[in-house]
Image: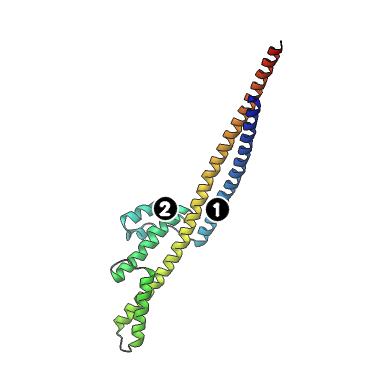
Amino acid sequence: MRSALDKLVSWVGLALAAVLLVAGGLLTWANTFIADQVEEQFAAQDITMPEGPALESLSESDRAELEEFAGSPLDSGPEAKAFADNYILAHMNSSGEALAGEPVTYEEASSQGRALMAAIAENPDATEEEKAEAQAWMDLRESLFMGNTLRGLLLYGYAFATMGTIAGFAAIASFVGAGAMLVLALLGFWHAKRISTVETTQREAALV
């Protein structure tokens, strides 16, 4: 009875090992596929991480995040996140501060720009300063729109790159788990054979 139970558990272990091997293979494929796609999409953007004078206008915290990648091609998730959050966003905020004294969202710039342009259209006596201010808000609106668009693309790339990394770790765990289950299953079969031999010997001894 004990031998049969050991064999049953061992067969279940073999089945689990096979499932984990298949899962590990699929996760490895996902890791490779995502990495290739992310690198290809980043390469298409042809972005070089800022360095030297390009970092001087940034805050100390933003520079610290970017200096690690300074001058290298943007081709990885961490680089994409740093460029999006510590370079593009920093310049978007500084542009709003230069015009309004504080960071401005795209919606705020669009609303203000449209309102000023409408006021100028209704006022034929608008001054050059008023026209310049309205145009500055519209330019800021366009800059924020482009900045948000590029940030979105880069952060989506970062998210997929992170998923690929997680898939890689999960693949390793699956292969390790499959190896462990295989070893345990083989030990189970060995133990079942040993128990079977002992039980047979005991039965023969009892008959004698």
Where disc 2 sits, the SS reads: loop
Horizontal side, residue 178 vs residue 166: left or right: right
Q: Which residue is mark 2?
A: 69
- Inspect the image, locate mark 1, and give the three-letter code of the amino acid beneath it: Ile
Where disc 1 sits, the SS reads: helix
Query: CA–CA distance between discs 1 and 2?
Result: 22 Å
Q: Give residue 133's quadrant in the image.
A: bottom left
In the rendered image, residue 118, in percent from the top left (x then y), is placed at 36, 83
Q: Nearer the viewer, residue 108 or 12?
A: 12
Tell me the quadrant of the picture where the N terminus can be found.
top right
In the rendered image, residue 71, in percent from the top left (x then y), is placed at 42, 55
Q: Nearer the viewer, residue 185 or 46?
A: 185
Q: Residues within 10 Å of mark 1 (few under 14, many from 20)?
A: many
Q: Is residue 30 above or below residue 188?
A: below
- Residue sitting at x 42%, y 52%: 69
Q: Which residue is mark 1?
A: 34
Instruction: Decide which of tag 1 and tag 2 comes sooner along the chain.
Output: 1
- Residue sitting at x 63%, y 38%: 15
- Inspect the image, locate mark 2, and give the three-letter code of the amino acid beneath it: Phe
